[in-house]
Every structure is written in C-alpha cells, then in structure tokens.
Image: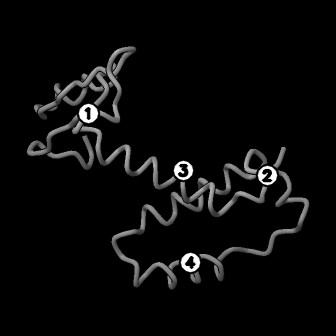
Amino acid sequence: MGYIQAEYHIVSDGLYCFTAVTQADITHQREIVGSHRCSVDMPCFKWVNILISNLKTGFSATYHAFKFAKYAGRYLAEHQYRFNRRYNLKQMLPWLLRAAVLTMPRPEPWLRMAEH
C-alpha cells in the first residue's frame, strides 16, 4: 500500500477504488454523500472541507486579477509544491533556490507551450 500503514483509519466517500484499503487489512469507514447528506455537516470531513475552503480563499485572494482558466495548472502546481513541503518550512526557500539554479534556461516559446 505504500505509505498507508495498518494502524491508520481511512475515511472515504465509498468509491470502488477503496476496496484495496480493506484488502490490506486497514480499517475503512465509508461515508456516502448523496442528495440528502451534505459533507460540510459531517464531522469526519471537517479537515477536508477546511483544506478546500482555504485553497479557494487563497486562489480568489491571490489570483483575482489574473486569468485563472489560462494559468490554473501553474497555480495548482505552486500550491502542490508548497503543500508537499509544508512540514519543513525552513528548507522550503533553499529547495526552491536549488530548483531555480538547476533548471536550464527556457526560451519564451517553450514556456508558452503550456498554454496550448
């Protein structure tokens, strides 16, 4: 299973792909969210909803003047980079500087290929 260990308790929306979790002897709680149940009212989804809310607020506050649809992939990549390194904030700037130094120069046409 990779990073998931037996002592973990997984809460999911009950998709079929989570059957692998139970096959690995990990406790799995299915919470079906449908037409009558709202995930924001369910305590098990509290932190998921907080995370989504914070991302939406961050996007709308930071990128309100830009064309989000055009640059959405880049914005999401930036948040993914910061989210994956959130537990070692002291190292984030050195990691970013190292990545910037090791990246080869890219001409403008190469950079614009991501827009198509």
Judging depth in this view, the residue of 38 and 22 nearest the camera is 38
Residue at the image point whose x is 68% and y is 49% from the top: 72
Point out the tag, 4 or 3, that comes first from the N-terminus: 3
Residue at the image point whose x is 52% and y is 63% from the top: 81
State the mark number for residue 56.
3
Which callout, 4 or 2, points to the residue nearer the camera? 2
Residue behind mark 4:
96
In the rendered image, residue 97, in percent from the top left (x then y), is placed at 59, 83
Mark 2 nearby-residue class (10 Å; few <14, some 14–19, many ≥20): few
Point out the tag, 2 or 1, that comes first from the N-terminus: 1
The residue type indicated by label 2 comes to: Lys
The residue type indicated by label 4 comes to: Leu
Point out the tag, 4 or 2, that comes first from the N-terminus: 2
Q: Is residue 83 left or right of residue 36?
A: right
Mark 4 nearby-residue class (10 Å; few <14, some 14–19, many ≥20): few
Which callout, 4 or 1, points to the residue nearer the camera? 1
The residue type indicated by label 3 comes to: Lys
Point out the tag, 3 or 1, that comes first from the N-terminus: 1
- Where disc 2 sits, the SS reads loop
Point out the tag, 4 or 1, that comes first from the N-terminus: 1
Judging depth in this view, the residue of 45 and 99 nearest the camera is 45
